[in-house]
Image: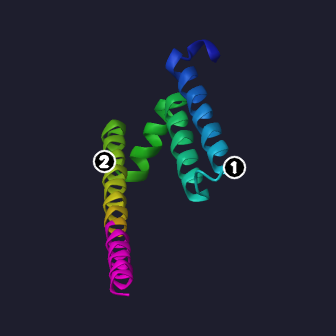
Amino acid sequence: MLQNFSLYQLLVPLFSLILIAKSVSQFLHHKRTLRELLVLSFIWAGISIVAVFPDFSMHWLSTFTGIKSGINALIFFVLVVLVYGLLQLLIKMEDNERVMTELVRKIALRDLEKDGK
């Protein structure tokens, strides 16, 4: 069975394992949250499964989504994930802007009080 594997079917899982290990290391050094670790691990494991078992994974994805063509189902799934990620980034950006505005206001009021005394 190993002789039927392409080079990418061997390299992609290896690359995925390296990135999962890097994410675990970052989590242990408190540079990533548990949520980020789980999401990244899930994504890289999924990419590995698609690389190693392309026919099975495409058939499963097309059956799961109800889209007859496996590649169309994959494209649809990736687009949904990208749009979701973009919306999450926009929400985080708006939260950061709100927090920064509050902080600037507090600093300005504190500096005004210092200058007034």
* Tag nearer the camera, 2 or 1: 1
Q: Residue furthest bottom?
A: 117
Which is more N-terminal, label 1 or label 2? Answer: 1
Q: Residues within 10 Å of mark 1 (few under 14, many from 20)?
A: few
Residue 6 seen: no
Answer whether residue 54 is magenta in the image: no
Please report the bounds of the magenta region as a residue range.
Answer: 97-117
User: Pointer 1: what residue?
Assistant: 28
Specify the quadrant of the image occupied by residue 94: bottom left
Identify which amino acid the numbered label 1 is placed on. Answer: Leu
Name the residue: 36% across, 65% down.
Answer: 96
Q: Residue furthest front?
A: 117
* Residue 40 to residue 84: above or below: above
* Residue 110 to residue 19: above or below: below
Judge from the rendering whether residue 110 lies leftward or rightward of residue 46; answer left or right: left
Residue 100 seen: yes
* Horizontal and vertical percent position of residue 106: 37, 79
**SS category of the residue bearing label 1:** helix
User: Pointer 2: what residue?
Assistant: 79
